[in-house]
């Protein structure tokens, strides 16, 4: 790892962003036989680490900081990967507007020359813009530093309010409820996880969290926070006040687009790439939470998940190496909330039929989604066999007939051969 403020460096490939996608891109380049220098620049002071455990195992005390590292320090040295931590790229200049070579200048003033460029810059949590939003005790979760601060606050808390009923918010709520806190989830929309799952799954999760002791409030528009030096409550637009000594806000991610936009490669939604991570400029790619990718069915989509970051990074590395594009990966996701493991494959956008397999009351079931009789996605709760079989079928371009999907007497893997 690089700790020396060298004023000028040369890198065959410059990767901006040291998260899961950035590291995977570097790893994939090496696996594909690239021997030229690689430099990975990250804004955090730590080497690349896993983010998913931050809202689950880390908050619950089941994982500690050193266990989250994605690679040991010896890996970077052995593979000629220069890792620059705690540094931000301020400007990028291309030698030729139609080619990917150029120079990047960091906030501290060092210059990084490159022949190829990758944006794996992720994003930053969307902030609340209401009265009291700067009070102590209001937390956002994106980095390990955020998680350390939140864990310390939760240890001292008795009443916790979670603003936002998405994956991260519900994972935090489940962990806090399990540790004995009085937890209320405030969701502005009329259902939980509305951006990620279908209404059938939203209803199940609202009821399941309530059974475990978490309070769920839907259509809850936050108008402000109460407190003097520290937060004491959350004000809702309808006049209600939810008492809380810790508030966690999880209302979405804003992708970092400024650098890519300066090259004409990004809009408000993210960095524009094709299905294989390629931007319109040869030699420049993007992957991970910042990338808006062209989906063959649903059009431009930006997916926030580790599996997507890994798949995009692998495809982008292959593109930089000049390899022929492979097949487009089927998106898949997971979320651990208390003892409920949600696994998803495909996207539920635009479905016209849903088949529920199993009994939701048993908390072990699946929902299969169809468009014109063709399976497009599955969401499984504690039903790993269903999920794995359906994901494989989706990857193969196969189908599970809707009339047969709900028959639990026939394993879904039986449809692999049809």
Image: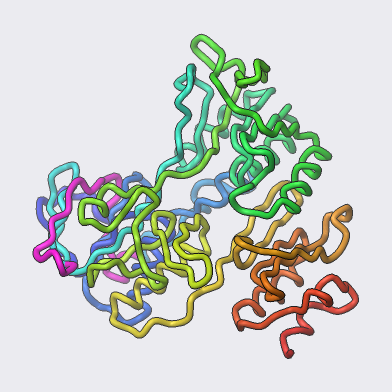
The extreme right residue here reads: 409
User: Looking at this view, is 383 or 198 the one in front?
Assistant: 198
Q: Residue at x 10, y 66 (%)?
A: 96
- Residue visible at 49% across and 58% down? 303
The magenta span reads 76-100
Where is residue 295 shown, x and y percent of the image? Answer: 48, 68
Q: Is residue 74 left or right of residue 415?
A: left
Q: Is residue 299 left or right of residue 245?
A: left
> What residue sits 18% from the left and 50% below the top?
4
Identify the residue shown where x is 61% and y is 53%. Answer: 196
Q: Quadrant of residue 260?
A: bottom left
Above or below, comparing residue 224 to residue 68 in the picture: above
State the image coordinates of residue 319 (x, y, percent, origin top left).
32, 76
**Magenta-drawn stretch contains 85:** yes
Q: Quadrant of residue 402?
A: bottom right
Quadrant in which the C terminus is drawn: bottom right
Report the front residue among 358 and 305: 358
């Amino acid at each position: 790892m690089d700790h020396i403020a060298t004023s000028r460096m040369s890198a065959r490939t410059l990767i901006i962003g040291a998260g899961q996608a950035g590291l995977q891109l570097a790893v994939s380049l090496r696996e594909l036989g690239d021997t030229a220098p690689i430099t990975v620049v990250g804004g955090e002071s730590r080497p690349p680490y896993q983010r998913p455990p931050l809202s689950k195992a880390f908050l619950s005390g089941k994982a500690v900081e050193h266990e989250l590292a994605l690679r040991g320090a010896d890996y970077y040295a052995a593979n000629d990967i220069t890792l620059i931590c705690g540094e931000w790229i301020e400007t990028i200049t291309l030698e030729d507007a139609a080619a990917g070579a150029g120079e990047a200048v960091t906030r501290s003033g060092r210059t990084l020359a490159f022949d190829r460029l990758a944006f794996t810059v992720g994003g930053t949590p969307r902030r609340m813009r209401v009265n009291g939003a700067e009070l102590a005790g209001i937390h956002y979760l994106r980095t390990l530093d955020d998680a350390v601060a939140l864990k310390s606050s939760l240890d001292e808390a008795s009443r916790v309010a979670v603003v936002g009923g998405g994956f991260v918010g519900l994972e935090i709520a489940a962990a806090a409820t399990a540790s004995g806190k009085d937890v209320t989830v405030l969701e502005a929309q009329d259902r939980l996880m509305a951006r990620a799952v279908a209404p059938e799954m939203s209803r199940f999760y609202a009821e399941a969290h309530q059974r475990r002791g978490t309070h769920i409030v839907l259509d809850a528009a936050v108008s402000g926070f109460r407190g003097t030096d520290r937060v004491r409550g959350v004000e809702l637009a309808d006049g209600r006040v939810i008492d809380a000594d810790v508030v966690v806000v999880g209302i979405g991610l804003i992708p970092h687009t400024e650098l890519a936009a300066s090259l004409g490669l990004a809009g408000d939604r993210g960095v524009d790439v094709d299905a294989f991570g390629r931007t319109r400029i040869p030699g420049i790619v993007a992957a991970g939470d910042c990338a808006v990718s062209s989906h063959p069915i649903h059009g431009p989509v930006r997916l926030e998940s580790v599996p997507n970051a890994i798949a995009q990074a692998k495809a982008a590395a292959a593109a930089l190496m000049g390899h022929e594009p492979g097949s487009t990966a089927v998106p898949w996701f997971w979320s651990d909330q208390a003892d409920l493991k949600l696994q998803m494959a495909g996207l539920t956008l635009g479905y016209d039929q849903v088949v529920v397999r199993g009994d939701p009351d048993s908390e072990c079931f699946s929902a299969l989604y169809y468009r014109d009789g063709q399976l497009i996605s599955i969401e499984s709760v504690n039903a790993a066999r269903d999920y794995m079989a359906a994901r494989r079928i989706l990857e193969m371009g196969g189908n599970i007939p809707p009339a047969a999907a709900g028959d639990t007497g026939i394993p879904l893997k039986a449809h692999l051969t049809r």
